[in-house]
Image (cartoon, rainbow, N blue to C red):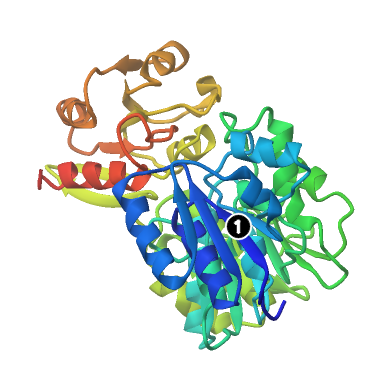
Amino acid sequence: MSGLSGAHIAVIGLGASGVAAARLALDKGGDVYVSDLCIEPKAAARRTDLRARGARVELGGHDIERLARSDMVVVSPGIPPHAPVLRALQDCGVGWISEPEFAFRFFSGPLVAVTGTNGKTTTTLLLGHLLEEAGLRVAVGGNVGGGLAPPASELALLQHPPDWYVLEISSFQLSGIETFSPQVGVLTNLSPDHLDWYPCLEAYYADKAKIFDNADDQSIWVLPAGDDSVGSLIGDAPGNRFYFGEFEESGSHAFLTDGILTLRAEDHLKPLLEAEELSLLGRHNIRNALAASLAAHLVGVQDESIMTGLRTATPLPHRLELVADRNGVIWVNDSKATNVAATRSALESLLLPTVLLLGGVDKGEDFRALVPPGANIRAILAYGAAGPRIVREVGKAVLVEGDLESVIQRAATLAEPGDLILLSPACSSFDMFDNYEERGRLFTALACGSV
């Protein structure tokens, strides 16, 4: 798509993705209308900026007739599929696309897309780092959030096209694709999530599967080894499949051998890095590193450059981030763990006796499978809106009333030297915080004694 001159483009949602899509549409010559139910000061400031650029912006509601008359409707990922505005458009027979789909139409280089239930952000940013270490020009973004990388539409505005685009893409964003087709697709893993958003697990998986919709024989897929649900998801989609996992399996291409991250290429093994040298905490981050390394290898990065990139990689905030070591107690911020699988993975990765902080707004998942067998648990403190249900479903869990600061104070009294205090909530943050980043920042400040 070369331009949008004269086209009427509607954007629903005035968050970061919506603003980026509106700016891209304006830059390409579109006549742009943006609407959002929000009327908060942040939204008002964004409205002012977009109006100055030539867009029409409405806060506090949506003009359904105007939306329906548009040539294209772009929906931000924060708009749920059951939102009244989308139902109204559906009743009018009007379809829509997601913001990454819109951006993709203006990309001018090859794309790696990373999706999955957990590990998407770490894998996306680590892959970007590996490509940059190899001297490639890389544009990283998408669903990353947290200020770590921009939305896809911002990448489409770059004056100089990169050698590779690398996008994290969520199930919500995949639900609105039509032409989106990565040269390389990475699927980190699959497990239940967002059951507060989707009517059933099958609907969530169906959106994930859309990453394969436009595959062809040249497509490259990086997939977790030995995962039957992934095999069912990809089905008979065309393309070349490459597999990663902790253990060497028949046909796998990236794995651990005697504690060393290793690549297999044409029956030759290439050791990359001792797992203990990786600066990212947790076994699941070994899998993320294997996925990123394999993807980098498949786009032509030399193995020696991958080795250097792995050594220089740094942990991401709010993802098993070691934030303090006080009085012999280690504090780890895993606020990004907003589902049961993420928290369970963290517990599987940690060996020290752990005081676990769980709570927030649950997503309709079963908490009974949260603590893996053999986990070294000192105590479990439940809090927030999901606290009472956590106590009913998780053995040893104790309810703590009050705010997160009260929970952390209680945790500090229970932890002994040599223990670890872990914020890995298995829930979203929206009962007490605007997002998981705000929750993680408060935990970190309290852990460091700066509050």
Above or below: residue 364 compared with residue 226: above
- In this rendering, the count of numbered labels is 1
Q: Nearer the viewer, residue 190 or 33?
A: 33
Q: Quadrant of the N terminus?
A: bottom right
Question: Relative to residue 116, is residue 284 drawn left or right?
Answer: left
Above or below: residue 17 compared with residue 5: above
Residue 207 spot, x, y in % from top left: 71, 45
Q: Nearer the viewer, residue 47 or 182?
A: 47
Say what amino acid the circle numbered 1 marks. Answer: Ala
Q: Element under label 1?
A: strand
| Residue position for label 1 | 10
Question: Relative to residue 218, is residue 111 drawn left or right?
Answer: left
Q: Residue at x 38, y 40 (%)?
A: 351
Above or below: residue 232 compared with residue 139: above
Can residue 436 be seen in this snapshot? Answer: yes
Residue 140 spot, x, y in % from top left: 51, 71
Residue 409 spot, x, y in % from top left: 15, 29
Question: Relative to residue 183, is residue 384 drawn left or right?
Answer: left
Q: Residues within 10 Å of mark 1 (few under 14, many from 20)?
A: many
Residue at the extreme top of the image, as rendered: 392
Q: Residue at x 57, y 45 (%)?
A: 63
- Asked which quadrant contains residue 304, the reply is bottom right
Residue 22 spot, x, y in % from top left: 52, 64
Q: Quadrant of the C terminus?
A: top left
- Asked which quadrant contains residue 380, the reply is top left
Can residue 263 be seen in this snapshot? Answer: no
